[in-house]
Amino acid sequence: MAPIAAPAATPTTASGEVGTVIAVFSPKGGVGRTTVAVNLAVAAASLGGKRVALMDGSYQFGDVGVLLNLNPKNKSIADLVPELEAGELESLDNFVINHSSGVRVLLAPASPEAAEHVTASHTKRVIERLRAEHDLVIVDCTSTFNDSTLAILDEADVILTLLSLEITSIKNMRLFLEVADQLGYGGRKIRLVLNRADSTLGIRVADVEHSIGRKVDHTIVSDGRSVVYALNRGVPFFLSNREAQVSQDILRLATAIAGEGAKAAPAAESAKDRAAAKKSLFAWR
């Protein structure tokens, strides 16, 4: 699918306010994080009235471009580094791709080597610019805790944290929630999303909630046939099979987060406190 030329960006969103940043994160891979992030962005754009951006924050092995059938030779966040280093970042127009769904996409670097040049400071500044130019910014994070991922989570108004009905996923979620508390992320900043929630794997939703000590906020059904077929075609399942239950669940989630801007809670601690927490938590690095 060829990218559509991006129109000129305005310095602020249509409403005149800065946009809302939604980080899609999971402390374990293989739970459908990128698939959810991509389809969530497409569903949010379909609601109308909002300028939606999708950023691939998995710099080394990002798959957003694959799921949207975008040419990997397109510009990515790595191409922004010279401008960021020079302090001249004014617009992202030459770096984002307008997908036919209406979502503006900022791709991950084309190679792991290029990803090494994108720092946490670069990440923060790019998100600030995306926030200024869009109503809703959805960032697909890697499952690994690193400086750039932490920068994304810090900047996010809401963190959609995915888990599945697997014991390893539940264990990692419990650990992440403990870390999130130490990092000063307020309870309203974290939203738990149970993917493949109707899978018959011997674990019930109630078991998950009991194990992690909090309620699941959103659920998405399992539909491997629709999801994998769409993935292999490079077409989001929300576009190829909008009537499917999995698409309706994504639409329900998109409708919920579209209104998060006014409701997003401020961080429980100051940036200074969060920095101190990160220093102690990741001193081994």
Image (cartoon, rainbow, N blue to C red):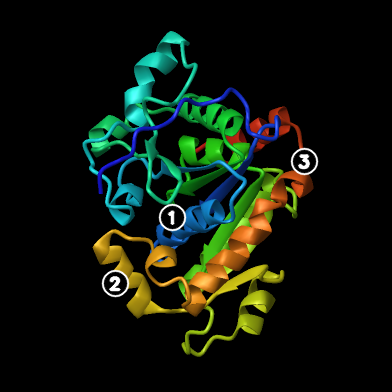
Helix, strand or loop status at disc 3: loop
The residue drawn where x is 47% and y is 21% is 91
Q: Mark 3 against mark 1, which lies toward the viewer?
A: 1
- The image quarter in which residue 30 lies: bottom left
Helix, strand or loop status at disc 2: helix
The residue drawn where x is 31% and y is 64% is 231
Question: Would residue 264 be found to the left or right of residue 247 on screen?
Answer: right
Q: Earlier in the sequence, mark 3 or mark 1?
A: 1
- Regarding residue 164, the answer to whether it shows in the image is no
Residue 59: x, y in percent?
A: 36, 40
Three-letter code for the amino acid on which mark 1 is drawn: Val
Question: Would residue 54 be found to the left or right of residue 252 on screen?
Answer: left
Query: Which residue in the structure is indicated by mark 3?
Result: 266
Helix, strand or loop status at disc 1: helix
- Regarding residue 279, the answer to whether it shows in the image is yes
Question: Would residue 51 be found to the left or right of residue 267 on screen?
Answer: left
Question: Residue 38 got which mark?
Answer: 1
What is the C-alpha distance between the residues marked 1 and 2? 15 Å
Q: In the rendered view, tell whether residue 270 sits above or below residue 101.
A: above
Three-letter code for the amino acid on which mark 2 is drawn: Tyr
Q: Nearer the viewer, residue 177 or 230?
A: 230
- Total count of labels: 3
Residue 285: x, y in percent?
A: 45, 36
- The image quarter in which residue 29 lies: bottom left
Query: Which residue in the structure is indicated by mark 2?
Result: 229
Three-letter code for the amino acid on which mark 3 is drawn: Pro
